[in-house]
């Protein structure tokens, strides 16, 4: 309120012209009031100085008023004297001026408050952008390490089609993504879920309603978590347990592997990276959520600024929650459907697919579910309750009651089988009925025509196709080669060059006893790293599946070795390089080129799926070009053989390629590969995967938004290819092209493949779109060059690799 004092002075100065000053001395800045009242009132000189400071303007004027009431005649302000009556005249003016000033102050205060609020909002935005930058930096650093380990990596040459297109690409965001997409995509995996058979029980932790609400609010504010089903969120809230940390204690350490998520309940925490503060975490925020999907490195450190209370969720619990819902629903439906008469003899995998696409509906008693004569598109199975079937018969005034259908009975098939019009009425009976429904497309795809369904009461030749295990003897060449290499030991293999670097080790070009006329790829995996990341089961699955497969579309595994540090796989070599490298150098492929590489993959996937193997890591990085220009799948680290009709729950794959059911842990099977096939088509034609963001969590959020949110068709990916992608990338795995009774043939029949020479592809007479240049069996020109790996892993003696 020092301002008040100044203001009074200023008002005085303004009014100086109108006053008649008398002279008197006074100290600078003081105002004296000289009284001319009778003696008992003794002449008084009142000094108004800093006493006034701190008082409001109104009380200042009250002092003036008071002085005037004392009938003081003259007032000295500074060195000048003023007549009191003159000053009195000024009071209303001054009051008015003060009022105006007050109003101005209030207005200014409102403006200041708005600015303060905006500053807080901007600060929050900066924090969030900072976090994004940080995540992005960590992703790019990881990718950069990948690229750095290949100094020979070429960047796209100027004037390439990609550069022309880039001119039109959107601003910085696209540039960053483009930089990321030029780096190889990293695969991620949780430790295999031991829960495949039966979910364990979940422990609830007591918390009050306010705590539950705080967690729920935090979950709903989080882009990823809010997409969970309502029941899953309820369970997640119940299962979180309390953790407290004292001021100064570290809650998360940068660089450590993470396996839990936190919700801040009380207190503040500071986030830093390499010692540099990044922001503050306040109550109601979620942190570390990527860690509940799979093992990932913490990107920042988090320290308690005050004593804090946190709610914690472990990855294993999150997996159980998400898996349980999918499994329970699946199990309930499966056990119900196997009892439904029309499905009695269907194989389990067919029923499982039907279960995936069924929806559930409820009708109150008396409600007409179907009306005779209407157009119909839905097939129904009664899950609970009863319905009455009535039919309008010519000559009868009322529909005639024909029969009552019970739990397990079905209806609505006739309109789907041709005439489209309903042939009877279906009315829900009291107290109501619960039905499972299937749309026309799924009905026709999964149950086939009605005759086949009827015939299926006893058997189904068509469906048994996919479940009878195919036991083919390995082709003579593979058997002969395996026999030939029987005596080969690690010592016989000579390293010629490095072909690639993977998550667990390196792949070297080798020859036997110096004979460079025949070369192989030797994949060496660090045992310690495998154990540390609990991937033993995946590595064994890779070995077993690759030993079992014998086709032109999959790289052949001839022999395996092991020593104290590594396990090894001696593989058929593909010297044309990775499809990823060709794609990177060309920018993107046209329809003709992409179609060939998609067709090769389709052959490979069909081969695997017929053996109940799900591949789970389709991407251009895992497609190798043989010298002939034909494509082969490599890297079976995530492949898994499933029991017919069964699903698996382990989160694995490459973030840009994982399907929604993998992200949401609903259980997945071969149809996850069809999703990936859709993504693969997009990547080949766009030059980058369609769902790509700065960090995996954002990628998953985009994936969950679905393909309809993508800006396709566009100038690179046309209408027909888009139509195929959209049929492959359906959110519901059972609705994906390839999942129906027609299998992979449904994909081959799609119009994008119209006129494609499948026969020519199979017998290798079809000319590949790109012919790789390979001079000799030791020519590695089609591979990036890699520096030697200075890291010698420690010995590992736990014995997990027994039998490798
Ligand atoms: N048979 C082969 N012929 C030629 N190159 C190969 C062969 N196998 C692997 N490579 C090269 O080595 C790279 C890594 O191989 P692979 O993907 O099998 O290893 P990984 O450790 O499982 O990798 P990731 O961590 O990406 O899953 C391949 O991308 C490829 O460039
Ligand atoms: N990297 C980073 N993490 C942040 C930031 N602000 C909050 N966090 C949280 O800190 C957590 C550290 O561990 P995670 O990487 O698992 O997840 C991180 C985020 O949830 C930020 O600015 N950068
Ligand atoms: N037409 C006919 N439909 C019946 C009968 N009993 C049950 N329905 C079911 O009633 C359904 C009515 O719709 P739809 O014609 O699609 O399919 C029909 C059958 O599924 C019956 O005796 N006659």
Image (cartoon, rainbow, N blue to C red):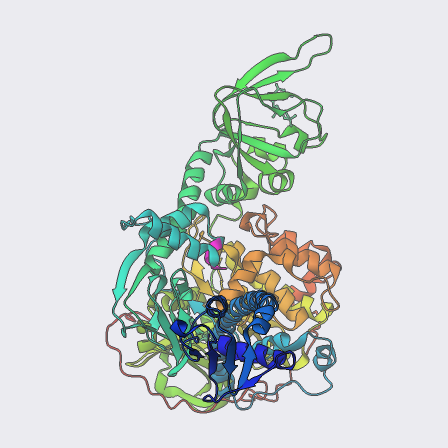
Expressed as whole percent of the image width and height from the top left, the position of residue 602 reads 60, 61
In this view, the residue in front, 222 or 364, is 222
Q: If the image is split into quadrants, where does the C terminus sit?
A: bottom left
Tell me which segment is drawn in magenta: 222-226
Expressed as whole percent of the image width and height from the top left, the position of residue 164 reads 74, 80
Expressed as whole percent of the image width and height from the top left, the position of residue 294 reads 40, 65
In this view, the residue in front, 350 or 764, is 350
Residue 664 visible in the picture:
no
Above/below status of 80 relative to 462: below
**Ligand 3 placement by image quarter:** top right
Above/below status of 241 relative to 455: below
Is residue 766 within the magenta segment? no
Image check: 279 left or right of 79? left
Above/below status of 516 relative to 252: below
Is residue 223 within the magenta segment? yes
Residue 40, quarter of picture: bottom left
| Magenta part, dominant SS | loop
In this view, the residue in front, 210 or 89, is 89
């Amino acid at each position: 309120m020092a301002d008040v004092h100044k203001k009074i002075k200023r008002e005085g100065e303004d009014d100086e012209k109108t006053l008649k000053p008398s002279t008197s001395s006074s100290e600078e800045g003081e105002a004296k009031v000289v009284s001319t009242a009778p003696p008992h009132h003794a002449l008084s000189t009142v000094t108004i100085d800093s006493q006034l400071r701190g008082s409001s303007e109104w009380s200042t004027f009250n002092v003036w008023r008071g002085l005037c009431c004392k009938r003081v005649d003259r007032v000295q302000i500074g060195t000048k004297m003023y007549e009191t009556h003159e000053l009195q005249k000024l009071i209303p003016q001054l009051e008015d001026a003060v009022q105006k000033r007050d109003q101005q102050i209030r207005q200014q205060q409102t403006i200041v408050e708005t600015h303060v609020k905006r500053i807080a909002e901007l600060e929050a935005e900066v924090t969030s952008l900072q976090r994004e930058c940080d995540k992005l930096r960590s992703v790019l650093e990881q990718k950069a390490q990948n690229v750095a380990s290949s100094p020979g990596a070429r960047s796209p040459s100027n004037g390439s089609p990609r550069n022309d297109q880039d001119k039109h690409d959107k601003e910085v965001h696209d540039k960053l993504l483009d930089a990321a997409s030029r780096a190889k995509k990293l695969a991620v995996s949780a430790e295999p879920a031991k829960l495949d058979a039966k979910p364990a029980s979940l422990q609830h932790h007591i918390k009050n309603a306010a705590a539950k609400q705080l967690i729920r609010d935090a979950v709903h504010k989080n882009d990823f978590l809010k997409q969970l089903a309502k029941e899953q969120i309820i369970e997640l809230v119940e299962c979180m347990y309390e953790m407290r940390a004292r001021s100064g204690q570290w809650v998360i350490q940068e660089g450590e592997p993470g396996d839990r998520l936190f919700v801040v309940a009380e207190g503040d925490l500071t986030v830093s990276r390499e010692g540099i503060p990044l922001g503050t975490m306040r109550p109601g925020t979620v942190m570390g959520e990527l860690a509940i999907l799979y093992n990932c490195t913490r990107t920042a450190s988090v320290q308690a600024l005050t004593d804090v209370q946190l709610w914690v969720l472990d990855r294993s619990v999150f997996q159980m929650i998400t898996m349980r819902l999918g499994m329970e629903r699946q199990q309930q439906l499966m056990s119900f459907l196997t009892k439904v008469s029309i499905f009695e003899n269907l194989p389990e995998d067919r029923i499982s697919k039907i279960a995936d696409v069924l929806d559930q509906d409820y009708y109150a008693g008396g409600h007409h579910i179907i009306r005779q004569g209407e157009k119909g598109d839905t097939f129904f199975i009664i899950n609970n309750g009863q319905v009455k079937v009535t039919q309008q018969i010519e000559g009868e005034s009322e529909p005639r009651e024909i029969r009552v259908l019970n739990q397990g009975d079905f209806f609505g098939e006739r309109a789907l089988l041709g005439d489209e019009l309903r042939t009877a009425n279906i009315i829900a009976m009291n107290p109501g009925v619960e039905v499972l429904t299937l749309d026309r497309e799924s009905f026709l795809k999964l149950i086939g025509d009605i005759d086949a369904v009827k015939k299926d009461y006893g058997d189904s030749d068509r469906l048994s196709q996919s479940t009878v295990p195919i036991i083919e003897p390995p082709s003579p060449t593979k058997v002969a080669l395996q026999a030939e290499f029987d005596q080969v030991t690690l010592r016989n293999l000579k390293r010629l060059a490095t072909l690639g670097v993977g998550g667990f080790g390196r792949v070297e070009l080798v020859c036997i006893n110096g004979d460079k006329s025949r070369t192989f790829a030797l994949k060496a995996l660090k045992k310690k790293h495998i154990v540390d990341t609990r991937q033993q089961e995946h590595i064994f699955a890779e070995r077993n599946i690759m030993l079992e497969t014998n086709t032109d579309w999959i790289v052949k595994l001839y022999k395996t070795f092991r020593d104290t540090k590594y396990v090894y796989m001696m593989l058929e070599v593909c010297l044309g390089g990775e499809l990823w490298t060709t794609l990177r150098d060309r920018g993107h492929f046209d329809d003709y080129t992409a179609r060939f590489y998609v067709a090769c993959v389709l052959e490979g996937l069909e081969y695997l799926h017929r053996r109940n193997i799900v591949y789970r890591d389709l991407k251009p990085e895992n497609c190798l070009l043989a010298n002939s220009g034909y494509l082969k799948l490599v890297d079976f680290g995530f492949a898994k053989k499933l029991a017919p009709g069964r699903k698996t729950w382990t989160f694995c794959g490459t973030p840009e390629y994982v399907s929604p059911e993998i992200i949401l842990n609903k259980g997945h099977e071969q149809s996850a590969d069809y999703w990936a096939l859709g993504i693969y088509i997009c990547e080949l034609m766009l030059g980058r995967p369609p769902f790509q963001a700065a960090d995996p969590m954002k990628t998953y959020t985009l994936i969950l938004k679905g393909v309809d949110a993508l800006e396709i068709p566009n100038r690179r990916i046309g209408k027909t290819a888009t139509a195929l992608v959209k049929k492959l990338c359906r959110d519901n795995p059972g609705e994906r092209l390839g999942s129906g009774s027609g299998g992979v043939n449904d994909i081959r029949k799609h119009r994008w493949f119209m006129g494609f020479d499948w026969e020519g592809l199979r017998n290798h007479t079809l000319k590949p779109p790109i012919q790789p240049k390979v001079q000799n069996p030791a020519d590695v020109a089609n591979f990036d060059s890699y520096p030697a790996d200075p890291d010698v892993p420690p010995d590992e003696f736990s014995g997990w690799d027994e039998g490798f």
